Image (cartoon, helix red, strand yellow):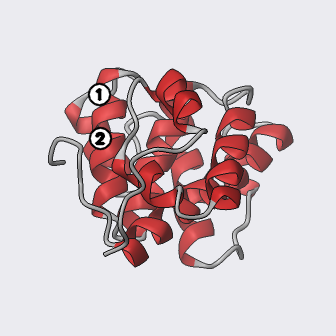
Amino acid sequence: MFAPVQDHPLFDQVQQRMGRVPNMTKVMANSTPVLEGYLGLMGALKKASLPGPTSERIALTVGASNECGYCVAAHTFAGKRVAKLSDAEVEAAKAGTSEDAKEAAAVAFARELTESRGKADPAEALAAGWTEEQVLEIVALVALQTLTNYVNKVAQTENDWPAA
């Protein structure tokens, strides 16, 4: 287990964005460039055209696919509290689907992208109504979530979220 850093100049930014400083960011603070990269991509993707609930579904799909308990717990919490996903939609996202056909196409693409290591065909997502811009945003979200999944698995980050 990597030791979490207790104080870092970027923690004020984390606190502002997340309302707290989660253990994951404390672990990332062992490498300032890693924490900066995470915060930079996360900040950029907050400006994306994908709806917030879609982003949470993708995070749940990728976290479950990569078997990252920390990220599944964090995004179950955020999915329910922030994105207002129902319990059924959270569970569907973990399985790589959704009750909504357009959302199902997005999470299926994200899951395929994750499991195939990038060899995914966006045709179904595009046919479901997602734009090329949004497909690229899905790719970026998968990359961001993969980073967090891998950091948490390698570091064995202690879960500080409610159990999923």
Q: Are marks 1 and 2 in contact (CB under 8 Å)?
A: yes
Callout 2 environment at 10 Å: few (<14), some (14 to 19), or many (20+)? many
Residue at mark 1:
80
| Residue 76 placement (x, y as % from top left) | 29, 40
Relative placement, left or right, of 86 versus 37 is left
Relative placement, left or right, of 81 versus 134 is left
Q: Helix, strand or loop at disc 1?
A: helix
Residue located 69% across and 49% down the image: 36
Callout 1 environment at 10 Å: few (<14), some (14 to 19), or many (20+)? some
Residue located 23% across and 43% down the image: 161
Q: Can residue 129 be seen in this view?
A: no
Q: Tell me if residue 2 comes above or below residue 28 in the rendering.
A: below
Q: Which of 129 and 29 is in front in this view?
A: 29
| Residue 15 placement (x, y as % from top left) | 47, 27
Q: Which quadrant of the view contains residue 49? A: top right
Relative placement, left or right, of 115 versus 47 is left
Q: What is the distance, in whole Å, between disc 1 and disc 2 at their CAs?
A: 6 Å
| Residue 126 placement (x, y as % from top left) | 75, 45
> Which image quarter holds the N terminus?
bottom left
Residue at mark 2:
76
Q: Nearer the viewer, residue 70 or 19?
A: 19
Q: Tell me if residue 134 comes above or below residue 115 in the rendering.
A: above
Q: Helix, strand or loop at disc 2?
A: helix
Q: Can residue 48 be seen in this view?
A: yes
